[in-house]
Amino acid sequence: MKALLAARLGGADVLEIVDLPDPAAPAAGEVVVAVSHIGLNFHDTLVLAGRHVVRPEPPFSPGSEYAGTVVAVGPGVAAPVVGDRVAGNEEFGCAREFVVVRADRVTALPDDVTAQDAATVLVTYATAFHALVQRAETRPGETVVVLGSAGGVGSAAVDIADLLGAHVVAGASSAQRAAPALGRGASAVFDYGTEAKQRIKAATGGRGVDVVFDPVGGPLTDAAVRALGWGGRLLIVGFAGGDIPAVKLNLPLVKGAALVGVFFGEFVRRDRRRHEENLATIFRWSAAGKLRPYLSEVLPLASGAQAYEALASGAAHGKIVLTVRQ
């Protein structure tokens, strides 16, 4: 089988397409999935560079979400069965023609959700949904500011917050990158500039923000905390900006605010039932045409290194999906 492989930790330049043996028969509780689509996430670049809590030993394949068809099942597996269309997410290892995974970590795809759509929404939308629904308990009418709105998880958060009935304000590193959110659920946009706090508050009419979705980190986090209103919640989703910020704790104290961690991978491991319920809602919205994924590019597996370079450099707008087979 073909696989996108990293022989060592590093950037996209360490990736190459190699031939590997096809997987052996699955062990008890496992299934083999013929992958058709792979969704790329910024998280993957951190794993690839050795800058994530998950640190695989090279050689390994990047890629944390996939969709495809079950082609073999191991002993003791009642579901899924051979021929079922499924999707799933792992910390890494999905950028290849076949994956061997635990049967209880795959999700059956409804007939009206395509494999490409599943690979586009599985991680980003599920992360945004978990953050905004379970962690922030976002209510209709609240103001949600989404940082990094041009990225995969940020653009998903704009979409989900709008569906939850929130007033959505989207921020990005430039006016050009922020603008597309206006057609995707945001009622106002801003670029960070040098006065991020003032820009955030101006975009929200001068009042404090109820929820900030922050996958960026760095100095923007301090500005976001300062822009929170009474009882506001800052969702700590990641640090795509590179730096892990230090927050002055007097700020949430005087605002009655909360700093809320969002560790999607651990949530999936600890509460699989709720994750499946979240996915059922997301797939239902997708089938009904309610989701507006910001799909940047669909590229073949052979272009995996190019795709990861675009993701790591910030050149990508929205989501990138790799195709293995149609």
Image: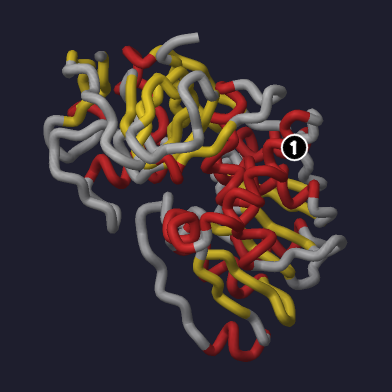
Does any portion of residue 317 appear in the rendered image? Answer: no
Give the camera-side residue of 293 and 252. 293
Residue type, mark 1 in image: Arg
Q: Which residue is mark 1?
A: 284
Instruction: Look at the picture and state if 265 lies above or below 174.
Output: below
Give the camera-side residue of 231 and 126. 126
In percent of width and height, residue 258 lies at 60, 79
Q: Residues within 10 Å of mark 1 (few under 14, many from 20)?
A: some
- Where, by quadrant of the figure, is residue 145 drawn? bottom right
Residue at x 25% of width, y 25% of height: 25
Question: What color scheme is it?
Answer: secondary structure
130 left or right of 159 in image? left
Residue at x 60% of width, y 49% of height: 276
Give the camera-side residue of 156 and 70. 70
- Where, by quadrant of the figure, is residue 290 drawn? top right
Q: Residue furthest top?
A: 326
Question: What number of labels is visible?
Answer: 1
**Quarter in which the N terminus is drawn:** top left
Task: Provide the secondary structure element on which disc 1 rests.
Answer: helix
Residue at x 42% of width, y 52% of height: 241
Does any portion of residue 127 appear in the rendered image? Answer: yes
Residue at x 82% of width, y 46% of height: 187
57 left or right of 46 in image? left
